[in-house]
Image (tube, rainbow, N blue to C red):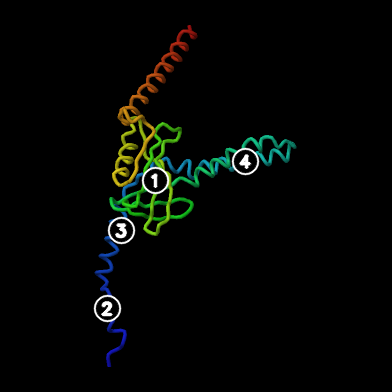
Amino acid sequence: MRHASCGARVAPPLAMAHHQTLGALFKFMQRSMSSATTVFPMIFLPLIMLSVLVGSVVSAFEQGNAIPVFAVLPFVVFSFWFSWRIHFVSTDGNRIYLWSYRGSKEALLSEIQSVRAFSRSKTPRIELTLKLSSGAISKISFLPPIGFTTDRFWDEYEFLSQYAENADHDVPQSSNPRESANSKNSVILIIWVLILVAILGLAFFTSK
């Protein structure tokens, strides 16, 4: 007699292993769009500020002075608020994969509604608005890699903007954002070099 369960198709071990290998390969092929330094504002900064707050509270009890606690508290709140908004972002060319303290999720690149780049901010970042297939609107923020030339920053912005309905940045539309950012960095570098030369010159003449 044929057992009822024999009618069900069971994937052979080789096919299952092949499927798992492909899954691992696709995961490996994901390209990170977030800067490696994201770990600092997302993890270490809140821990540092929390330890400062604890130290201020202990000091307040010992010395009877609560002013340092109230002085530190806004910075602690800001650090947690900022880290709560930051995401680690990666892509495989078809989807973007997001991870934050609010959990992990993924979305199709075609679900990007708008992209906005903040290259001149103290914390250069890119903000995305996703319109998911469920109809929900999700806003995320991430820190792309940024160096002296800012090319990686604009590479990520241009990659995402080609899928977005709306794209905007904080560089005047009349100028090339890459050239504008690089010119700004060149001026900053020249200023730092002049400051260093002035310090070395001052140290040389005062040592005589």
Q: What is the distance, in whole Å, between disc 4 and disc 2 at their CAs? A: 60 Å
Q: Which of label 2 and label 1 is nearer to you?
A: 1
Look at mark 3 in the image and give the residue it sits on: 24
Picture coordinates of residue 156, whole percent (x, y): 32, 41
Q: What is the distance, in whole Å, between disc 4 and disc 1 at their CAs? A: 32 Å
User: Alpha-carbon neighbours of circle 3 within 10 Å: few (<14), some, or many (≥20)?
Assistant: few
The answer to whether residue 28 is left or right of residue 130 is left
In terms of image quadrants, where is residue 58? top right
Q: Secondary structure at mark 4?
A: helix
Q: Amino acid at mark 1?
A: Leu
Look at mark 2 in the image and give the residue it sits on: 9
The answer to whether residue 74 is left or right of residue 169 is right
User: Alpha-carbon neighbours of circle 2 within 10 Å: few (<14), some, or many (≥20)?
Assistant: few
Look at mark 4 in the image and give the residue it sits on: 53
Disc on the earlier residue, 4 or 1: 4
Picture coordinates of residue 113, whole percent (x, y): 36, 48
Residue 128 has which mark?
1
Disc on the earlier residue, 3 or 2: 2
Q: Amino acid at mark 3?
A: Ala
Disc on the earlier residue, 2 or 1: 2
Q: Are marks 3 and 4 in contact (CB under 8 Å)?
A: no
